[in-house]
Image (tube, helix red, strand yellow):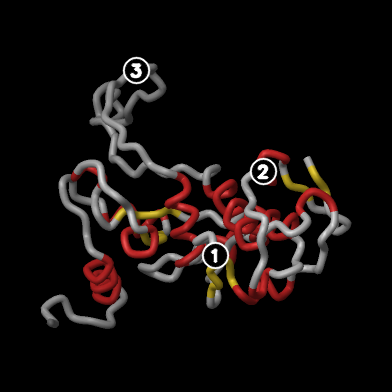
Amino acid sequence: MAQCPHGNSIPDEVIALLSESQAGQGRHKCAVCAYTLGAKYSGDPSVVEQCGHNNVAPIDLLKRLPNYQGGPTRHRCAVCAYTLGVERGAANVGIDVEDRFGGNAGADEAGGAIEGAVSFRLHREYERDSRNRAKAILYHGTKCKGCGFFFDDTYTPQHANGYIEVHHVKPLAAGQQLVDPQQDLIPLCANCHRMVHRHRGESLSLDQLQRLLAVGRGGLSQTST
């Protein structure tokens, strides 16, 4: 684990993944700080800069990084470090919105239901890649694309810590596919994500979701085109 003079640290295995070149706003910037800020990322990304290794980072964040070219991260790409930080942070939040709620078996005479019994179920799970989730967050931020809800504003950044769910525009059930994080993934809050998948076997488009929200909020009639 390497540390920089600014009090941040970066795992040795991550340093080994960083490209040894710098350019643009990330030139001569501290890659350790970039990695740390990436792991804590939340909010709306500003205009992003893409490095020669096809990674991206917000330009305004790169400008704020302290200059530092000491230690094992000397001449390492700060944009790559930032992206790897986001991937590390995003990998800690895995979301599966498959509806697995059971029936009301075991109801007692008072009308309640008995819960807590242990059961084992076999279910199909579709493989996800945390790198796609991380890159979607880099492009879209952590504010819900449906209703605009931002967890950090409501629950404080210390508690929410950049929490957001990421929705696959193309259902994974359609089969193995190449995912474009910018086009095929969008951030949604838990409520909007549930409503998109409310009816089994179908999912709403972002336009359909936003239209429902407009109707529900009274800003649009249900028969409007």
Q: Quadrant of residue 160?
A: bottom right
Give the tally of numbered discs. 3
Q: Estimate the spatial distance between the alpha carbons at disc 3 and disc 2, rounded to whole Å.
A: 44 Å
Q: Quadrant of the C terminus?
A: bottom left
Q: Percent x, y for residue 1?
A: 78, 40
Q: Position of 31 compared to 112: left or right?
A: right
Determine whether 58 is above or below 123 in the image: below
For disc 3, the neighbor class at 10 Å (few under 14, some 14 to 19, many from 20) is few
Q: Position of 126 compared to 78: left or right?
A: left
Query: Looking at the image, which residue is at 51% across and 63% down?
Result: 138
- Residue that sits furthest to the front in the current view: 21
Q: Which dot marks residue 173?
A: none
Q: Position of 81 compared to 186: left or right?
A: right
Q: Position of 97 compared to 131: left or right?
A: left
In this rendered view, identify the residue nearer to me: 148 or 167.
Answer: 167
The three-letter amino acid code for the residue at tag 3 is Ser
Query: Looking at the image, which residue is at 42% across and 58% down?
Result: 189
Q: Percent x, y for residue 53?
A: 53, 59
**In terms of secondary structure, where does tag 3 sit?**
loop
Q: Earlier in the sequence, mark 3 or mark 2?
A: 2
Q: Which dot marks residue 16?
A: 2
In this rendered view, identify the residue nearer to me: 153 or 44.
Answer: 44
The three-letter amino acid code for the residue at tag 2 is Ala
Q: Is residue 11 visible?
A: yes
Residue denoted by label 3: 119
Residue denoted by label 1: 52
Q: Quadrant of residue 6?
A: bottom right
